[in-house]
Image: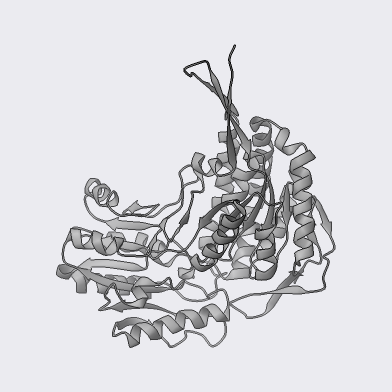
Amino acid sequence: MRQHDTLFIGGEWVAPSGTGTIEVVNPHTEQVIGSVPDGTPADMDRAVAAAREAFDHGPWPRLSFAERAEAIGRLAEIYAARQGEMAALITEEMGSPITFSQLAQAPQPLGMLQFYAEYGRTFQQEEERPGLFGPSIVRREPVGVVAAVVPWNVPQFVSMTKIAPALLAGCTIVLKPAPETPLDSYLLAEMVREAGIPGGVLNIVPAGRESGEHLVSHPDVDKVAFTGSTAAGRRIASICGEQLKRYSLELGGKSAAIVLDDADLGASMGMLAIASLMNNGQACVAQTRILASHRRYDEVVEAVAGMVTSQAVGDPADPATGIGPLVAKRQQERVESYIKIGMDEGAKVVVGGLDRPYDRGWYVAPTVFSGVTNDMRIAREEIFGPVLAVIPYEDEADAIRIANDSDYGLAGTVWTADADHGLDVARQVRTGTYGVNCFMLEANVPFGGYKASGVGRELGPEGLSGYLEYKTISRLG
């Protein structure tokens, strides 16, 4: 049992103001594996006050970019030494297959720290630009106190997309982890202390929705950085709009994988399995709409079905497992409700369905639907589980039209023997991240979505810009 009875505020472990606790349940065993305090609005007030004090009077915002980059580099070294521990912990608390945790859940946050540490070493706070009447200075300053509100599916990944650039910018942060996955944030807090990051620069308060909204609404928070559902994003945007507060939103997706007629299905299915089923399907970028031409439709359905059935379903701690349990019973029930919706809409279950693979654990049967049209709910709504819909198209233009016929625009892929032509397709699909014969997220390039998939960008130089204010200083003489 990992039992924590304190919160990380002002660089110290402090007692919570309330008596409530959050129990963390392993989704494979359904057993409680840990607990943390359930942060209250009063706890959020203390955390914001600590962040405000650290920003207004502490050393962190007053260091140079190079000095902050050096500290981030120290944190990266500590993180690298403990990334195996972090991967195992995330698998334990939310059911991510250990191979995925070792591939992405821990290494990608480390990569973000390394990128911003390197990028910050030569980043210039000021630059001079010529003007009509004399030079002007463009100065970059930190936006202030940041509220980072993150979900449970890739908890360190989404936390670090906010923490790493905010630290480099000189901001101070209050992180609210999701109630399902707070344990990894405690490990992160230990690393932050060891790295010598000043107190109050990063504060961590696990909590539920009420305390989260209190944090978002707090008048001393200068920016909100949120990853989660589109519905919650709209609520946060409305709060920030009323207060004229900065915000960035990384929201849902319903991404399309376009399989062109020249694609080598045998070669494509291995990478498509990662792109569509990563993290047990609990990924906003998952390629859950598989688009295949009428000419090869049956062949693609068969290949996708084979790809899904080849994934071992079971204990996420077992390296042989390809698909583990969903994070919670409510998520299991939600995904199963969508499988039933698909059946009721007239789609055909090719593999999977409503029979659970295990009596214990929050598992669902990985499911492939054929005979899907793009107006069905299973093709339009984010399911967030291992459920794939194979949709037919007439020609390439029709495939691009279907891919774009979505409220979302977060990610996408195209699968083809002609990678150069794949780039032509990529340029026509309105999404923020796209892959040709693959799907990857890199720390040095921007990540975010079009349409209802979000506002703003994370990662890369663009991700740092979201935590900076730009000041122009003009002068004569």
Q: Is residue 38 above or below residue 189?
A: below
Image quadrant in which you'd find residue 32: bottom right
Residue at image coords 29%, 82%: 347
- How far from the left and from the top, in percent, is residue 438? 35, 54
Residue at image coords 38%, 78%: 367
Q: Is residue 7 above or below residue 362?
A: above
Residue at image coords 28%, 72%: 374
Residue at image coords 27%, 77%: 372
- How far from the left and from the top, in percent, is residue 145? 68, 48
On-image quarter of the N terminus: bottom right
Count how many numbered circles sit on residues in the image: 0
Answer with left or right where residue 205 lies relative to residue 73.
right
The residue lying toward the viewer, choosing from 364 and 88, is 364
- How far from the left and from the top, in percent, is residue 139? 59, 29
The residue lying toward the viewer, choosing from 65 and 157, is 65
The residue lying toward the viewer, choosing from 302 and 470, is 470
Q: Is residue 203 visible?
A: yes
The residue lying toward the viewer, choosing from 256 and 471, is 471
On-image quarter of the C terminus: top right
- How far from the left and from the top, in percent, is residue 52? 75, 47
Image quadrant in which you'd find residue 395: bottom left
Q: Is residue 198 visible?
A: no
- Can you name the residue that lies furthest to the left here? 295
